[in-house]
Image: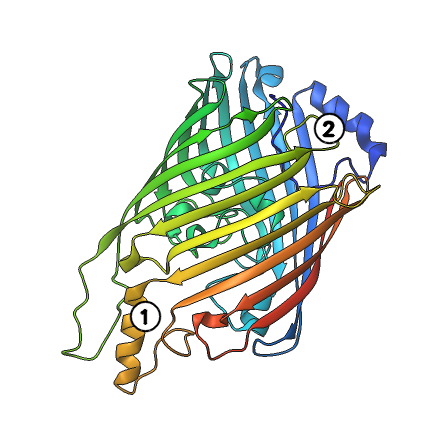
Amino acid sequence: MSAGYYAASEAPGHILPQIGAFRSRLQRYGVAFQFTYKGEAMADVGGGISRGMDYVHELTLQTQFDLGRLFGLNGWTVHTLLMERVGREVSHDRVGDYNISLMEVYSLSGHSVAHLTDMYAQKSFLGNTVDLAFGRMALTHVFSTSPLLCSFMMTCSAPVAIKLDAGFSVYPKATWGGRVRLRPTRDTLLQVGAYNVSPLNEDISGWAWAGEKSTGLMLPVEFTWQPFLGPRRLPGHYVLGFAHDTTRYADNLGSVPAGTARAHAGEARDTFYLEADQMIYRKGGTNQMAGGYVLGGYIHNTPDVSVISDEFYIGSSLLGIIPYRPHDRFGVMYSYYQISPRTTEGQRLRMDAGLLPGGYANGPQTHAAVLEAYYGVPVYPGILVQPEFQYMMRPGETSRIPNAEVVGLKVIGTL
């Protein structure tokens, strides 16, 4: 029951087992590393604004330093992650949507040559019932995320309604902060944190610490129930979370014609989320990912100062559904996104006055939905090939762009 709840999107093993002896020798001295390539090619084949394909990739170097073996500081570890990202986003170029990224790797940070994502210390106490982490980190490493979400392109490393919130410093955007995780009982977790807030487009390199603009403080708290149900001990993860961002954000109403409406004063942003997954059958092993899951979630943001006020999703991630393919994973998810009513109202008022709605909008934006499906195949130790299909309803959150059909391929390789 303590087996790892690890990322389902990675293939087991390594491409180069020949360096296994070198890897083991480093680990004996307290140093572990992993080098990964992740590439995504997605093409609009119907609807949207144009036909064609976009490609993005990332290269990541993860390292972990065991300070007990290195310096005698037992229980302490230091984690670092460097990455390179480059490419173009099919949502922008082909589909016509600037709020919902259909490709995971491009994300909100765009191109990065040598982006520092993580540099933080971690320490576990009292038989792993207390865990402390602090330094440079992405908040969505540990809050409002799961390995199952990260097997889908759109929800890795968090649901879209949370990714668009600057306070959540979504991976790979890192910020200064820390969190404490408590395990009061075997099946429960409580974690609280405090993180500096800066705009998502600040410090694209991750290295300009002194030049980051601080706008406030993000204060998340999250409770998780992790039961193991039935005679086969089927794991579930039920998460209730709340986060308060002290930053004062401008009203989404924006600039409107005189006499039509009045914008509210700057307002802090709150986020409430409920996320759950439950294994429904076990297959191929005893760890927490050896089986099929159903999952779902709901996110609500303060409407007046959030791009997406509400989101819900429901889906499944199923292992070994084809005979003689026990390690393949099939996933399907439906996600619905509600644009802030204040955003819609401001756009409508500007258009009624003969003005442009603003930004990339082609009309008053209301809602959109996406259906995503994938089939992941570990074709070789350390290599995962994952065909993808996405059907976006109401691109741009209006009815002016035809629904888009997007197909493509994700490849993950681990050295």
**Residue 359 drawn above or below residue 354:** above
- Which residue: 45% across, 52% down? 312
- Where 67 falls versus 234 (above or below)? above
Of labels 1 and 2, earlier in sequence is: 2
Q: Identify the amino acid type marked 2.
A: Gly
The label shown at residue 406 is: none
Q: CA distance from mark 1 to mark 2?
A: 49 Å
Amino acid type, mark 1:
Thr
Q: Which residue is mark 2?
A: 285
Q: Visible in this render: residue 89?
A: no
Image coordinates for residue 88, horizontal then vertical, percent:
60, 66
Disc 2 residue crowd, few under 14, some 14–19, many 20+, Cα 10 Å: few
Quadrant into which the N terminus falls:
top right
For the view shown, which residue lies furthest in the bottom direction? Answer: 354
Which quarter of the rendered picture does the C terminus lie within?
A: top right
Give neighbour class at mark 1: few <14, some 14-19, many 20+ (Cα, 10 Å). Answer: some
Front-most of residues 400 and 177: 400
The answer to whether residue 279 is above or below residue 384 is above
Q: Secondary structure at mark 2?
A: loop
Return the residue at label 1: 344
As drawn, which residue projects farthest toward the left?
A: 259
Would you say 395 lies left or right of 247 here?
right
| 408 in relation to 401, above or below | above
